[in-house]
Image: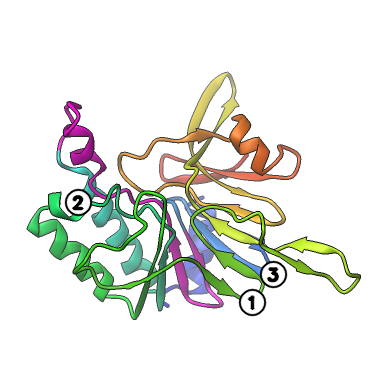
Amino acid sequence: MAISEQWLSSQVALRNISIVKFSELLWVLDARGVAYLPALDWLVVSDLHLEKGSYLRSYGNPLPSIDSVATLKRLQLVIKDYMPARVISLGDSFHDNHSLSRMTLQDKKLLCDIVNSVSQWDWVEGNHDPDLPVGIPGNPCHEIAHDSVVFRHEPDALKSSVSATGQAESTPQVIGHYHPKTRKTISRRRFSGKCFVISDNLFIMPAFGQFTGGLDVNDEVMLALVSEKSRVCYMLYDRAIFKV
């Protein structure tokens, strides 16, 4: 852990971070699109989608080969700021099963250097990358459970527990997959950006990857997961984070 109370206070004042509570833990939401748990010294990131650009180029899309290195360099800076004991990448870290074969040697080295700079790195499997590419350090896993919270790529409706009164309760889950985004109108100006979405039992991470799009929080798919009344959104815009 590299952060201090003074650093936290200054970053909150600059709107670079917001501090929230979810599943009895305090979370630092970073405007760069990651979440940090000070009590555990864990950093959570989701949906890197490495080599999405080269995948789309193979289908005729004229995209430059910059997405992987741009994503990795941004992630490297975040990790240098927090110096976490553990990083959890919440699935779709690689855009497809052949991503690594299209990655340049320099980008592969950068990726391995970043992973090896952390004591523990967990790759949660996603729908785009059910198998970790051979030769990449880190621990592949289906999900990670810690006390009362589960980290996985997509929500599991079967995750439930029984309360002291005998009532079934859903286990809080931290997920990725949906790439949430939202918008806000201020003084007739419309702002939009990626966002965190948080309810009592669901914490949806924004996508971190350079070429990742987004699903509006008011889309029917998102509303089926988290209703408008039950959620709080934290929008990322121009290196700042805003509660909307």
The numbered mark at residue 24 is 3
In reply to whether residue 100 is colored magenta, the answer given is: no
**N-term-proximal mark, 1 vs 2:** 2
Cβ atoms at labels 3 and 1 below 8 Å apart: yes
Quarter of the rendering occupied by the C terminus: top right
**N-term-proximal mark, 3 vs 1:** 3
Pick the residue in front: 166 or 86: 166
What residue do we see at 47% from left, 45% from top?
Answer: 240
Residue identifier under label 1: 147
Residue identifier under label 2: 69
Q: Which amino acid type is shown beneath numbered disc 2?
A: Val
Q: Position of residue 64 (x, y in %)?
A: 15, 35
Q: Report the magenta residues as a range.
A: 35-64
At mark 2, the secondary structure is helix
What residue do we see at 72% from left, 55% from top?
Answer: 200
Circle 1 packing at 10 Å, graded few (<14), some (14-19), many (20+), is few
Pick the residue in front: 115 or 54: 54
Cβ atoms at labels 1 and 2 below 8 Å apart: no
Q: Quadrant of residue 234?
A: top right
**N-term-proximal mark, 3 vs 2:** 3
Q: Residue 117, can we see it? A: yes
Q: Position of residue 123 (x, y in %)?
A: 37, 66
